[in-house]
Amino acid sequence: MSETRFITTQALAELTAELLAAGTRVVAPAEAADGAVDYQVISNAKDVVLDERMPRRSLRGFFQPPTEQVFTWNRTDSGFSLKPVDLSTEPWVVLGARPCDAAGAAAIDAVMNGEPKDDLWMRRRETVTVIGLACAAMGPGCFCELVGKGPADTTGSDILLRPAQGGYIVEIVTPRGQAFVEAHSAKFTSTDAEVQAPPKRYDPAPMDRIEAWLEANFNDEFWQELSLRCLGCGTCTSICPTCYCFDIVDEPVGTSAGARRRNWDTCQVGLFTLHASGHNPRPEQTNRCRQRIMHKFYIYPHRHDILLCTGCGRCVVACPTGVNLPEILTGIAGRAGEDTTMGGPA
Amino acid sequence: MNVYEPYLMTIDDVIDETADTRTLRLKFQDESVAESFDFRAGQFGEYSAFGAGECTFCIASPPTRRGYLECTFKSAGKVTSALRDLNPGDTVGFRGPYGNHFPLNEMEGKDLVFIAGGIGLAPVRCVIWNVLDQRDKYGKVTIVYGARSVGDLCYKRELQEWSERDDVTLWQTVDPGGETPEWKGEVGFVPTVLEKAAPSAETACAVLCGPPIMIKLTLPTLKKLGFEDDAIYTTLENRMKCGIGKCGRCNIGHVYVCVDGPVFTAAQLAALPPEY
Amino acid sequence: MKELQDLARTLLSDGTVQVVIGWEDGPTGARPVFVTSPEGADKLIFDTRCVHNLATFLSPRRSHVARLGKAAVVVKGCDARAVAMLLRESQIKREDIVLIGVRCGGVQKDPASKEPLTAATVADKCTGCDVREPHLADHVVGELPQAPPNDDARERFIEELSAMPASERWEFWQTAFARCVRCNACREVCPLCTCERCIVDKTQPRWIEPSAHPAAIMAWQITRAQHHAGRCSDCGECARVCPAGIPLDVLNREMARILQIRFDYTATDDPEAPAPLGAFRTDDGQEFIR
């Protein structure tokens, strides 16, 4: 479903102020104390930043906080009691989600929604209205097109704002988006404005062939070469829109109470897979580097038919030693192309 | 629904199988859950020592015996040590049953060969009792079980029971050097004793669990005896947290041990990348 | 950088080393490269984008690098401070590595930047550099450039912070640390985080909770700052990698300033110089040990 309207910059700011005044939780890009832009819970419409600056981290933290309680417990003389966290969630709004970030959160739904349904994640997904913001320009690391996405992709957005003269062309994507626009209809007008899309940077990579190569090439000197410069810092996984791996820990308070928490975790550290016996199936960075690529471009698509990467490019810019996903994907595609046992056009 | 919320269980009994291996018998605190809870042999759970965390163990008691669950574990780290500090009457948590299961339906009418080493007997024991509790559904039952030493043999009472049954052929063994003067069983590694036992592979299945080295050396012996890779079942373990395929850590290639396993055939194992 | 390439080619072809760890031109700027054949030496570069501290690849935790064999590492004078610390702490042996010192006139904040080096673009760590001519090295290559442009922004900020009343300083750090997600990237990039099992990864007992809540974040940040006091070489990689933009280098510099005051010690590339918190002197100010 795709219907277009228009909203002026002014009207959008007023709409944001109205949402806040009504007590709605609004997450939008805003300046952090150090001047960089982060997605944040905003309290003032004036704080919203919708320019070319990309938020430094993805939206993941608003669906799965870096740490969240799962339940608390208490042990008294009268017995042991366990209190799960209240999962009820008020409808909330993300304003200014980059298409790669909106699509990233949607990609994770496949694993979280699968039986049994993880409501810690899904309750936030089911109550959010995502107002996406199409990109007027590509950032230094961006490669969304390489993985089949794009600067105006609508996946995961309920409404997509496309920057135009004086405001935004509004593309309504979902019924929820439709309902939102109707609820605030005075802010929106009709339009025949034209959108300027940024010039294409990449052709889509042959993801099917890449997936097939990955399945067939677990042991290949390719992994050794690529992993040498990797320090296993995991910064790629903490800023990524599609990373979701987590840890579960208990935090006791004294001897009679405590909380179980779910925390962000990363496949890039040895502790992730370390057995209590001391055995580690992924003992070296080479194994761990391989796991990240495998998970994103073979394991997840194999299981859920969705790529676990939306090409936001943050990892490209953030990696301290220049590990580069487009370079890796192109390298694999090249190897896949040369492999005549794999079928398909050479 | 909060899928990470465990059932509350009371420790009903504590049995020390060996110096470092303990069995806990657990009962559901909620009567309605106790009545309705069901599972299949091979499935596992996440057991909580509140304050320390959760640990993955198979359900070691058979589904044919209702009203309680058993788990058997070795003290290895934080959670197993904390579980070891608990006593009858204490509360633990249980999430499950998770994972796939041994295909007991497909095993009906077949001869069954159970091979286990050390604490690997725990998941196999679950199947053994499931089978013995429905004895006439299955053919011959052969058990080959070994441990490093006599002291390391798990479920000693049950080994005694099995040895006394005339519808079970039990071979017990300890590693060379692990025998005591009173020991009447075999002395030798499990694969060697299996070869001696030489169970027929015709209309038979093998269920195998133990330390990786034992599995590695037993598979060729089974092959030599004529067992096809898809008639050999084993159960894997890996570091787990969620147990339900969400936290992303227990995969071997594209297979998640917690949801696609923990039970695998030798054929499925052979297709997995060497990452476990 | 022909001199560097020629040297690398020689070291590899005569078998002195099996790998030369240096920099290359990558898709998004200068990045570490591992040259294992003489022909590969052509990839080696050195320019103002070579921000990284390659000493980190010598850390014993990088087993996947160690298996390549004996390494020659290209180090700026400041990187050599980290090598000196690794030697001092017996994490590596001097005879197991070859150090190729490179004369340096400062690096950018951003390894992707092709801008000229100015006060605005120069890395904070370069101000007041006294190791443009590397001291700890088996070979030294390159021409000695002029001193880096002076940008004392970080120094001034540290003075500002120190002059703040404690409550205001606390507020600053609380706000910065609130963004910490306990990703441990700072730890993983650091050449001097060499513990086989980091204290936050220990579970029996659990000294520091791994969760990203204020109490645990503060425990981690304080512990890390303490563990780095007197050891940090100020390569700034922790701050550069932090996905939350926490100014970790400022914290480490402040610890270094305190070490200077208390122990008259500054991080040095002399591996023989005793570490202030790892060695005892009879004229030590601490009474209790006498």
Image (cartoon, coloured by chain):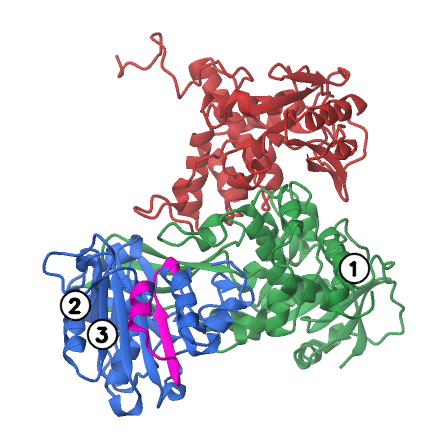
Residue B207 belongs to magenta span? yes
Write down the chain letter for disc 1.
Answer: A
Mark 1 vs mark 3: tell me if same chain.
no
Q: Chain of mark 2?
A: B
Which amino acid type corresponds to the residue marked 3 in the rendered image?
A: Leu
Please give the label number shown on residue B216: none
Location of residue B233 (image quadrant): bottom left
Q: Check contact, mark 1 vs mark 3: CB within 8 A.
A: no
A252 on left or right of A5: left
Closest to the observer: C172 or C97?
A: C97
The front one of A338 and C131 is A338
Q: x and y percent of residue C157 in the render? A: 59, 28
Which residue is identified by label 3? B170
Q: Mark 2 to mark 1: distance in Å?
A: 59 Å
Taking depth in this image into account, of C151 and B15 the one nearest to the observer is B15
Q: CA distance from mark 1 to mark 3?
A: 55 Å
Q: Which residue is denoted by mark 1 in the rendering? A: A338
Verify whether residue C60 appears in magenta. no
Position of residue B151 measured from the top left corner of the image (x, y, whole percent): 17, 58
What is the number of callouts on the image? 3
> Which residue lies at the image location 60% right of the left edge and 37% below the top edge?
C68
User: Horizontal placement of B35 versus C196: left or right?
Assistant: left
Q: Amino acid at mark 2?
A: Lys
Distance CA(mark 2)–CA(mark 3):
13 Å
Q: Chain letter for red?
A: C
Residue highlighted by disc 2: B156
Residue C138 image offset from top left, x and y in percent = 63, 17
Chain part drawn in magenta:
B192-213
Secondary structure at numbered mark 1: helix
